[in-house]
Amino acid sequence: MSLQFRMLIPILLMALLGLGATAVLSWRALSINEQARIYQDDSAELSEAVKVIAHQADMSDDELHGVMEMSTLFDIDASWQLVKFNMDDITNRISVIDALSVSAEMRDLNGKLKIISREFMHDAAKVYGMEAAPEVPTRELITRLTEQMKAVSDQMLHQAALDRTGFETMSNAKFNDQVQVMAVAVLAISLVVILGSVFLVQRTAKKIRAVAANLAHSSGNTERTDGAFGRDEIANLQNAAQSFAQRATALAAFQTELGVAVDAAVAGDFSRRL
């Protein structure tokens, strides 16, 4: 492994760590945002359903009052069909709310609304003669049931606002928790990477010092040992290499001079001296 690559390893690890942390945090943020979007859609659908329920209850109540007072001519069958349509619509919207992701408090209120609407429907059927009954419900009873449906509807709208606030608070807290966990994880991994990098650099520096010491010893510079080198390992290695090169140059010159002397001796010239 090259020295350059060894020095790049910590940088690459830190870069990958940053990219990984960013990717995870972005994914968590998108997940929380998607949950918030779904909740907002459900909340809007719930509020619309509750408003329609209150409106349908008012319309049914007015229709029933007109029939009970008999102040004008009524087509009883058409009036019953209108009231039945309104109450069926209320029942359907209550079922829609049951299918939504709502709080336990909202589910309890929806259960109360379901009970009241059924009671209202039964009493309306008695008024129109669609169900046999020993006595017809009074106008006060019908009005009380209507007011109860409207009161529960108002409570549901208020609870929906509280739930939205609570969900936003929970989402923010969840996101902050994710950021804190990610920060701790990044800090821990960064510490490991830094310690590993320090170990790698120290190990590499130790090997460089050993090579420099061997070169210095091979060049005949016995005065400098591994412990006598300075902190700049690259400079130490360069100096040792220069000393070794000088030693090699001197050795080559000696070998050349020796060859000339040997050739002269072979030729009978013994005057050459080394």
Image (cartoon, grey):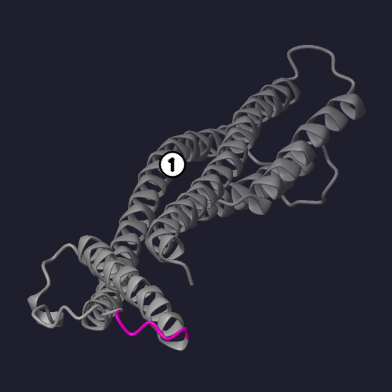
Q: Nearer the viewer, residue 68 or 192?
A: 192
The image position of residue 241, as x and y in percent, is 29, 67
Q: Amino acid at mark 1?
A: Gln
Q: Is residue 268 magenta?
A: yes
Is any part of residue 109 visible from this angle?
Answer: no
Apparent side of residue 77 relative to residue 122 in the rendered image (left or right): right
The image position of residue 261, as x and y in percent, is 37, 80
**Residue in the image at 72% along x and 20% along y:** 66
Label 1 residue SS: helix
The image position of residue 230, as x and y in percent, is 11, 67
| Residue under numbered circle 1 | 159
* Rendered-image quadrant of the C terminus: bottom left
Q: In terms of secondary structure, what is the magenta stretch mainly?
A: loop
The residue range painted magenta reads 267-271
Is any part of residue 241 visible from this angle?
Answer: yes
Q: Height in image: 17 above or below 152?
A: below
Q: Nearer the viewer, residue 188 or 116?
A: 188
Q: Height in image: 203 above or below 109?
A: below
**Residue in the image at 48% along x and 51% along y:** 19
Apparent side of residue 177 relative to residue 105 in the rendered image (left or right): left
Q: Nearer the viewer, residue 25 or 30?
A: 25
**Residue in the image at 51% along x and 48% along y:** 32
The image position of residue 107, as x and y in percent, is 54, 54
Disc 1 residue crowd, few under 14, some 14–19, many 20+, Cα 10 Å: some
Q: Is residue 10 magenta?
A: no
Residue that protrudes farthest toward the front in the picture: 268
